[in-house]
Image: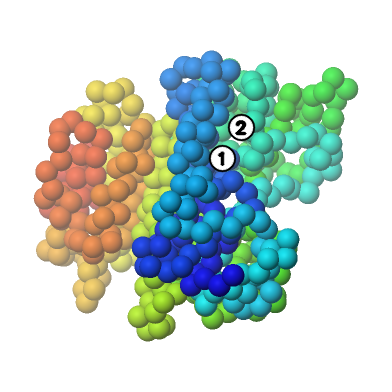
Amino acid sequence: MSHDLLVIGAGAGGLSAARAGVRARLATALVTDGPIGGDCTFTGCVPSKTLLAAAAAGASATDALARVRATVARVAATETPEALRDEGVDVVEGRARFAGPGALVLDDGRTLAAPRIVLATGATPLLPDLPGLAAADPLTTDTVFDLDGTPGSLIVLGAGPAGCELAQAFARLGTAVTLVDRADRVLPGLDADVSAVVADALRREGVDVRLGTGPADVEALGDGRLRLHDVEADRLLVVTGRRPATADLDLDRAGIGIGADGAVVINDHLATTTAGVFAVGDVAGTQHTHAADEMGRIAVANAGRPAWRRRRFRPHLVPRVVFTDPEVATIGLSESEAGPDAWVAEIPMSAVDRAVTAGREEGFVRLVAGPPPGTRRLTRDGLRKVGGGRLVGATIVAERAGEMIAEVGLAMRTGALTGRLAQTVHAYPTWSLAVRQAAAALATGASPGVTVRRAVR
């Protein structure tokens, strides 16, 4: 079968690419060997955020897990093969591998060909090499939502975003949770003060946070329980990362390169090392559903253009959110990454009236601004003369951080000066007013409760 566009994988990136192909009036086939919706619908965003919301609302463990299954089923019902075929996508069910640069072969012998291919096969859980782990029947994000009830006690191995989110959710559902990581703080990829706020929140809710641990054997106990680092528990949940799903694709037959991290090698146009083949999402080493969605659209647009007309995917404009309580949202550069030419405005949530009225004063808003193009290093007075500089990043820790980061993303995408945020009228009292207060300090030099300083490394 011949098409204009083949998309391999039906997660967020694959769905976005397939729909973009239809909009571009390309004969598009979506090839999948699993349920449409992928990790986000079945084992990632949808079930995890449903569990978090149910736990926060005080649901029982049984009701929370039932709500997870009902929500997954509701979302999945909008992404069936029949629904996509109605949209104009040719859904091909089966496992595909490359037979050459523009050709695929399925396990049943069918062949597909197209001048444009988008690879969107996602990622799979990565388990550490720990003695005794396999015998302990560990849970992963692929299996934890299949539970009918919550265990009495749970060890969560991995204090990254997913580990922190699930540790907090299960603690709220009544499970005795121990969070273990070899790093010296939770969320090690973020600034230390962010980690401290989240760790404090977890401990207040009863999570036993154990950091700086080394490798250890997983010991199966006689009563069906297990032991890790002298902690006994009913179950073990491993959330130590994900591996790009490239196995059995025969990428070498098409000349598609893989990097040292196991991800498909792409350039900033999302093109692989093989002409006509693009890669998006987790398989290309870029996590986050919304990033994969954006990449899918860009990849299809670029597949029909000469190199000099292609759009760049700009990861620094993709917000990243950790859905703990409080939430953590970041975009662009952190303070430590910005360099000595950048300025920082920071306001604690205790100085934001909406946070005070809600009794949720933990966290802060931190905006990072740099000199506009063509401007030399700025003094504090010079910063005010150029409208507070141009936003290059932000970190927000607050109850609604995931919502608050959006206007910062818009300002960064449009290249707006920080002063534009300060000039934008925000309703009172709202969480996002904190963004305006921080922006006003950069643009005018004065805003109650806000600290302005040069970025430090």
Question: In percent of the image, x 73 and y 44: which residue is there?
Answer: 214
Which secondary structure, mark 2?
Answer: helix
**Is residue 291 visible to us here?**
no
Of residues 293 and 157, the one drawn nearer to the viewer in this rendering:
293
Q: Which residue is under mark 1?
A: 42
Q: Which of marks 2 and 1 is nearer the N terminus?
A: 1
Left or right relative to 316: residue 377: left
- Reply above or below: 131 against 343: above
Q: Which colour scheme is used?
A: rainbow
Task: Verify CB contact (< 8 Å) between mark 2 and mark 1.
Answer: yes
**Residue for point 54% across, 81% down:** 275
In percent of width and height, residue 402 lies at 36, 42
- Which residue type carries mark 1? Phe
Residue at numbered disc 2: 145
Question: Along the line of sight, which residue is nearer the eye, 95 or 305?
Answer: 95
What is the x, y in percent for residue 69?
55, 29
Quarter of the picture containing the N terminus is bottom right
Image quarter where the C terminus lies is bottom left
Mark 1 Cα shell of 10 Å, populated few (<14), some (14-19), many (≥20): many
Q: Which residue is drawn at 14% across and 64% down?
A: 386
Identified by mark 2, the residue type is Phe
Residue 404 appears left or right of 206: left
Tell me how far mark 2 sits from mark 1, CA to CA.
9 Å
**Relative to residue 114, is residue 50 depicted above or below?**
above
Please report the residue visible at 35 percent of the width from the left and 80 percent of the height from the top: 309
Q: In which quarter of the image is residue 232?
A: top right
| Residue 128: x %, y % from top left | 74, 48
